[in-house]
Image (cartoon, rainbow, N blue to C red):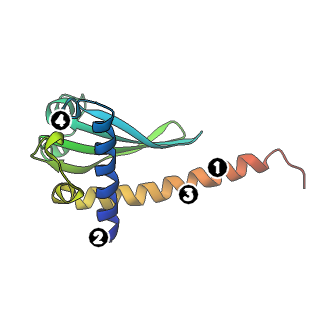
Amino acid sequence: MDDSYTTSLAGDLFNVIQSAQGADLDLDDGFSNQPLATANMTITYSFYPKHMVDSAPGMPESFRKRLRNSNIMAAIVLGGKPIGVFLLCALQQKFTEITSSEDLLQGMQAKDVENYAQALKKALKEDLVDNVTSSHSGTEH
C-alpha cells in the first residue's frame, strides 16, 4: 500500500473529526459521517469508542481484539449489500485528544487500509458501470 494514500486518508479522517467538533458533537460518544452516497453505493465512516463497537452482535473475536479506546471504521454498501467493514484506525487516546492527522497515522491499520482501498476501487468501478449502463438503457441506437 502506498504510504501517501494512508497519509491522505488520515488527513481526511482528521478533517471529519474537526468538522464534527465544530458541529458541537460529543466526539467521545461516537458519530458517523457519510462522505459518499450515490443511488447504488454508500460509504460510511464510523468513529466509535471501544465499548460501542465491542458490544455489537456478531463481532468476530479477531476484529474485537484489535479495538482500542477510539476506533474509526469504514463500511461500503453496494447495491444494498455490505461489501465490508474495515478498521481503518485504532487509538488509545480519546477522539477529543486527537490534535493532528499525525495522531491518526499512529493508529492506522495498514492491512485494513489496503483492503478498504481495494474494495473502494472495486465498488466505485461497479457503481460507475451501473450508472453508465442504467443511463444508456433507455436510449435507442
Which residue position holds label 2? 3
Which residue position holds label 4? 49
Amino acid type, label 4 = Pro
Residue 23, percent across and down?
A: 33, 33
Amino acid type, label 1 = Asp
Q: Secondary structure at mark 2?
A: helix
Inter-mark Cα distance, 4 to 2: 26 Å
Residue 8, percent across and down?
A: 34, 62
Q: Which quadrant of the structure image shows residue 50?
A: top left
Mark 3 neighbour class, 10 Å CA radius: few under 14, some 14 to 19, many 20 or more: few
Q: Secondary structure at mark 3?
A: helix
Earlier along the polypeptide chain: callout 1 or callout 3?
3
Which residue position holds label 3? 125
Classify the position of the C terminus by image quarter.
bottom right
Mark 2 neighbour class, 10 Å CA radius: few under 14, some 14 to 19, many 20 or more: few
Earlier along the polypeptide chain: callout 2 or callout 3?
2
Marks 4,1: beta carbons within 8 A: no
Inter-mark Cα distance, 3 to 4: 32 Å
